[in-house]
Amino acid sequence: MSVDGFLQRLRSEGRIVVVGASLAGLRAAETLRAEGFTGTLTLIGDEPYEPYDRPPLSKQVLLGRASAEHTALPRRRAIDAEWRLGVPATGLDMAAKRVRLADGDEVPYDRLLIATGVRARPWPNEAEAGLDGVFVLRTRDDAVALQRRLAEEPRRVFVIGAGFTGSEIASACHERGLPVTVAERGDAPLVGALGGVVGRVAAELQREHGVDLRTGVMVTRLEGDSAGRVRAAHLSDGSEVEADVVVVSLGATRNTEWLAGSGLGAGPRGIACDAGCRAFDIRGIVTDDIFVAGDVARSPHPLFGYQFLSLEHWGNAVSQAEIAAHNMLSDSVDRRPHMWVPAFWSSQFGVSIKSVGVPSMGTEILIAQGALAERRFTGVYGYQGRVIGAVTFDQTRWLEFYQHLIETTAPFPPPFPTVDRRSDGQRPLPADFPDPSVPTHGPTVTLSGYSPADRRITFTPGRH
Amino acid sequence: MTQASLLRQIIDYSNRPNPYPLYAELRNTPVVREPDGAYVVSTYWEIESLLHDPRVSSDARNLSVPPTDDLSEPEAQSALPPSFIRLDPPEHDRLRRMANRSFGPPHSPRRINDMRGELAEIVTGLIDGIGDTSRFDLVDQFSYPFPVTVICRLLGVPREDEPRFRTWVDTLVTGLDPRRGDDEAERNRVSNEARTQLGMYLAGLVEERRKKPGDDMLSQLTTGTHGADGSMTTIEVITTSVLLLIAGHETTVNLITNGMLTLLRHPEVLQRLREDPAYSVPIVEELLRYEPPVQLLPNRTVLTDVDICGVTIPKGASLWLVVASGNRDPKRFSDPETFDPDRGDIQHLGFGSGIHSCFGAPLARLEAQLALSELARRLDNPRLLEDPPEYRQSAVLRGPRHLALACDGIRP
């Protein structure tokens, strides 16, 4: 049997299973049909909803301007799929080519696409996380619950973590006229993604809008009242903030547990795959029939030193899903690499923030256009003499140019004048990212010494 | 045939009805240097990247060579300073932002949509007024009066003053037209004179609005404050409203006329539109690609040497971006010479791109959608009496001067 014959049969009567019924899963399914796949297509999702869009959840939905029920993703075409919604996948048998479901069913496949994404990292103390009034924000249900509570006009909202989601939640609270406190263990909001120079702008932005922003602190404990409702948060600086709503925004965890023991190269950091979205098994061998796409995938990127990048970006999910779907149905020479340049956007406190490349790899930043003081600027990140990332605050229309500089490994600092000659930026500044070698999460323990006899334990307290 | 002569042919009036074969030839060399030192860019990706390139300036003061006859810059020597279309950041951003406050989101998100009923009424009135259905001129009776009425209402300019400002606007638009060989100095003088006259006329209106503001844009520009941006000076209000008044109708008239012409050449599309007015949305997008009212942008320059497609465009050189050619670049669009409203992928350059992308795009889209769907619905068996029709002079703002039509009657 020739490979060609196999592909032909796969296209006409094969079985393709997509685990993860969200943006990446849906776009992959549409691409499969668009490319002529006429076999059986099954979409498995742990939530009971058809694929929906997440960006509105932390913005319009929290503001009460859009309802979470109306966030269903627009369909590009009919996909004629068998939907298994509300049933999580619980296991994978690679040898038998079957996906196990929570209801005991098993679904056989010829090609599998894993797009299970990420979930919100919960508050680590389960008892405290279970208090009434403690929320995370990732799913449609999360957004509905939080929106409902915000509509009851709590006296104060407490947000743990000032990354993008946390900052957007704070912005929504501000816009609803609710007092809000944000606690961030770093020195400024967004500091992990964009560095201290831009983080300080974000901090001013929050404070000017009346946000009670506490930086350099950690939350040590959430306290409930006798009825089991959250009433206060205790901070590492000894202070206490009374709040009746707490939103935990501590980033995301990858949904890979269901693959434990399957032999697939899946772990807490995602599922490793090649540039063509084919998953690796634990032996480092690329699989032929298992593909990954979206937030759960980790793939090597030549522009960024072949690092395995895992991107929680909307555009990445779409592009990777399209590539994975195409490659599933293609001969090796017709496969395409996923070479998406990372890009994301956020909108908070009336400012539109967009970024391309990997700013967090940058060691320096140049404000190439606009001015930090006006909060309308383009920041370009440099790494070892080349442009590696860029961010704009309310200057989106220039971003494409800087993306091109990143794609062509242009020199940093850029050697040319721009139309905006007033810019702060004839000179690069240190980008001021937190030192990755300094523990920020909290106290850690390190071991030193070689022999069991002289091994010493060193305790490093948290930074603050 | 040399490349230089291609651009001459494009500008030559005799090729106005169909410049597209010339654009196709032009694209064989994506970046061409003209004998006078100007650079002509004709392919989609190159134009698109230059429109987003912060080394490309719209400010005529950055040209190393003063504008020549090709590039007459009436605004450069005018008594009035340039409007934001001819400025760079941060001045451009500030003025455009302030103008946008009374036009679009986030401060006036519904302004354009709220005009829907009013626009429909104007359209109905104009179609009702078509007297002789055996022969009428779509331009004079519909495509021109419609957007003029709309921009006058939006800005708060009395519609009955139209004959006055039409003379000045016509002169100004003629001044924009790149032609070779005529008396450049005289043309600039006439253009400047017209722009000053138009400015003085608008200054009078500004004075009235200052005393007695209405809910029109002119009043809002005059009396509004814009947060950190402060408020517009009187001169800024005048330059901005000159721009909006001209750009608000000189382009839409062509979009509507080009649109009707194209539909009559594609009866199956016209028929589908007659049955489904919502089809006007993709039709207008495809028109903006296929027959864009603004064919080329001749007013940019580079602040430093810029390499593109293996050519170095030297600092201060003037730059012509032929957007209508980019819109038919086969490297960007499949089957680009076909008018196909059903194409899924349509990121055209009809409204430009980057910070100068068309300010009035939402209004132009709505006007054209309403106009074409109503014309399709109400004209019974419309026919072209002349094909190709007589074109306007301008190679930049290209469109028919007259479009002679006939139909069997006007449906209610």
Image (spheres, helix red, strand yellow):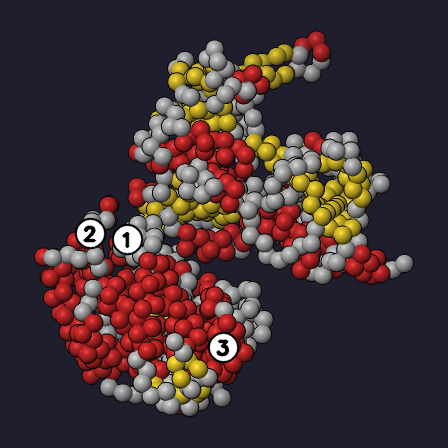
The first of marks 1 and 3 along the sequence is 1
Query: Are the two marked residues, 1 and 2, in contact with CB atoms closer than 8 angstroms?
Result: yes
Residue A47: percent from the left, percent from the top?
63, 37
Q: Chain of mark 1?
A: B
Residue appearing at x 37%, y 48% in the figure = A394
Q: Chain of mark 3?
A: B
Read off the residue under disc 2.
B224
Q: Which mark is residue B270?
A: 3
Is B227 situated above or below A457?
Answer: below
Q: CA distance from mark 2 to mark 3?
A: 44 Å
Judged from the image, the secondary structure of the residue bearing numbered disc 2 is loop
Q: Residues within 10 Å of mark 2 (few under 14, many from 20)?
A: some
Which quadrant of the view contains residue B87? bottom left
- Is residue A6 visible from the viewing direction of this image? yes
Do discs 2 and 3 share a chain? yes
Q: Chain of mark 2?
A: B
Residue B294: percent from the left, percent from the top?
38, 73
The first of marks 1 and 2 along the sequence is 1
